[in-house]
Image (cartoon, coloured by chain):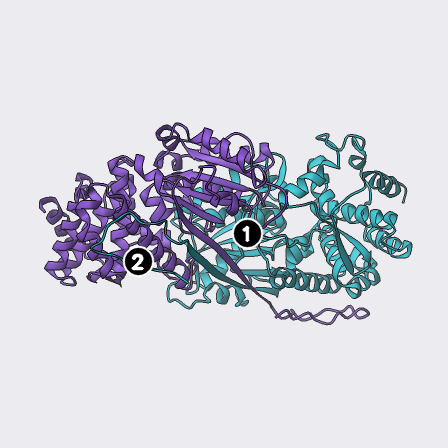
Chain colours: A purple, B cyan
Amino acid sequence: MMNLTTLRPNIVTALPAPQPLHQSLTVTFTYDVHFTSGLFQTENLLLAQAVNSDRTEDPKRVLVVIDAGVVQSHSHLLAQIREYVRFHADALTLAGEPVIVPGGESVKNSPDWVNLIHQTVEQVGLCRHSSVMAIGGGAVLDMAGYAAATAHRGIRLIRVPTTVLAQNDSGIGVKNGINAFGKKNFLGTFAPPTIVLNDFNFLTTLDDRDWRSGIAEAIKVALIKDAKFFDFIETHATELAQRNMAAMQQLIYHCASHHLNHIGNYGDPFEMGSSRPLDFGHWAAHRLEHLTHYALRHGEAVAIGIALDTTYAFLLGLLSPFAWKRVLETLQELGFKLYVPELDNYLDQPDHPESIFRGLGEFREHLGGELTLTLLSEIGRGIEVHEVDLTLYQQAIALLQTF
Amino acid sequence: MMNLTTLRPNIVTALPAPQPLHQSLTVTFTYDVHFTSGLFQTENLLLAQAVNSDRTEDPKRVLVVIDAGVVQSHSHLLAQIREYVRFHADALTLAGEPVIVPGGESVKNSPDWVNLIHQTVEQVGLCRHSSVMAIGGGAVLDMAGYAAATAHRGIRLIRVPTTVLAQNDSGIGVKNGINAFGKKNFLGTFAPPTIVLNDFNFLTTLDDRDWRSGIAEAIKVALIKDAKFFDFIETHATELAQRNMAAMQQLIYHCASHHLNHIGNYGDPFEMGSSRPLDFGHWAAHRLEHLTHYALRHGEAVAIGIALDTTYAFLLGLLSPFAWKRVLETLQELGFKLYVPELDNYLDQPDHPESIFRGLGEFREHLGGELTLTLLSEIGRGIEVHEVDLTLYQQAIALLQTF
């Protein structure tokens, strides 16, 4: 591959510009997503084995970053982690005190928490072969992942997602990030974790909104990829809304499978070309989170984004009325709202800072290249379009308000 | 690879923890390193063709980040860039005004410059398929590369290195970063550029220290990999010191080839395992830059680091006295100092914040895993050791002072 020229040790004369050198690098990332209950019970070997997977003799140093909401809901968790580490002292050791950070989107809205983790990494002398273990919802995992990815050019990252959304979607992928300049995930990197440990026990203490929120990403992937999965969600919508754990475990596992499959098998996991992430319904969702100052959770905003783009596809004549109704009714059955007043802001001024339509431009800018929206042609099949009809979108919003 | 379970649409019962999902991602990065003279002369098509390599119809947007030192030495450069872009308007367009940043290490010592680039990216609405074009020495490329790698999770990066060091080493690799907490490159990522454009004309205005500095990395790679290349440098040391451009072009090309080859062909370009970067002489070099408050340039510090580790290998009995003398005399012939007083700080207190020996621990921590130093067993052959004899290092320092 390299074209090393022969040196001319005794002739030093003016030379024509040499041929370009071609570089080609292939980097392989592997990680496992595990499912368990009671991750930090001393008899559960998963974490100890996972941390020590490269079988060095020394115990691995782990810096714990943990969501304050999780600490609050699981009052014995910190003590349990300490006990676990004491019991498995041959496998791992804590690097410093756990760093407790706020849960929810606020942790992504300032660089301070990333800085705090960097500072702690420096203070405890964490090296690249040690790990940050991030425990929490998607926002905490995003923020801690960004901090870990940028300290020493990337410290290993163990993710312990504690919400439905994080276990089936945001916590198992390759992205991290924080918000800046009022823009979602403006700063971040692509950085796969070294392992993901999904502990279903954390789901028992979620409030109803967080329980429900994560279902939106499962509906998203079902609608664009897997009609049978949508059937499953539709059939079990009531049980899911009533917090049936077995149904939720199946939903999470199946959604996570789809998500990993999409990242791993579509040839461009770091989205360097024009390959698309699974972002059906997301242009409006990101915008609504911002416009509601994150009063809407991500999944709630995604549900509205799905309802909006599904309705638009129906009005375009792309999707049948029957399929359209199934989608909206399933969302309602699960308890999602389909409309918030922010959808109606400044519809006649698409570039207004408070208009929902400004999200289309930001979406294009964030992903790069030409505008690409995913729409549905039927349940289980997404198609891409590159043009939008704002008048039809206004009608879609009006329909959502009265549905 | 994915193990999508069959859904059980009508049976919702408690389930055993499902099998882990395995993810494997392969990401390929390719880029070319070009050599030219007069990159921004309108008749030079290289840049226009490089920017437009994916042949979309629209001109590509480029945000220029440029080293103030380069602007000062090349007073017509900004006008020339504007003229180039006007002439090649079908291929590229400027996104906003060029961002002028300080040259040298100071640009890496505060997060402000990274923040400024982020802010500009946001203001001009640069997307992931647009490019940041960083023009300058290694420090500016490192800083701008970090900013580009973290905005929108990675904007494309065109590097235009303007120093010997950046053209043959730091500007052609896969790393970026800034300093934090007094530690070199504490923050950064692995992020290959999309293209590197080496313009030899920039070398003509370097001051003698910068001209010389970059030679140190070539000596480094020659000593651990390529005895013939060391012969070349030794033979042409006087011409190189006297700024013979043809000799320098050969040196840069050959050093760049080795560097790319090492990154591309040793199986671990992002250093996730225990593979080593080309860091012979660098533990002391990083430390000396810090201890001299960057009064020493990187290459000057590397030359001292090489002299130190070569002398240590000689005292260990690993390297012949003849080879040892050749290395030190070649460095001297090129005009490098082999000793600075900071080497002698607190030698009896290896953990003292001002001791050179503290660099050993920081080096280990930054790379992770066990301490690994590269030493020479002969010219052209590096070997790895994992233990150091501080008394012998003290003797090596004493020897350098009197050489």
| Up/down of B347 relative to A60, above or below | above
Does any portion of residue A358 appear in the rendered image? no
Q: Which mark is residue A371?
A: 2
User: Residue at point 55% right, 56% down?
Assistant: B159
Q: Nearer the viewer, residue B306 or A300?
A: A300
Left or right: where does residue A304 sit relative to residue B207? left
Across and down, in percent, residue A52 comes to 56, 46
User: Residue at point 89% right, 53% down?
Assistant: B325
Left or right: where does residue A45 sit relative to residue B251? left
Q: CA distance from mark 2 to mark 1?
A: 28 Å
Does any portion of residue B308 appear in the rendered image? yes
Question: Mark 1: which secondary structure?
Answer: loop
**Label 2 CA crowd tier, 10 Å (few <14, some 14–19, many 20+):** some
Across and down, in percent, residue A114 comes to 47, 36
Amino acid tagged 2: Leu
**Label 1 CA crowd tier, 10 Å (few <14, some 14–19, many 20+):** many
Q: How many marks?
A: 2
Question: Mark 2: which secondary structure?
Answer: loop
Specify the subunit that label 2 lies on.
A
Amino acid tagged 1: Phe
Across and down, in percent, residue A292 comes to 25, 37
Q: Which mark is residue B190?
A: 1
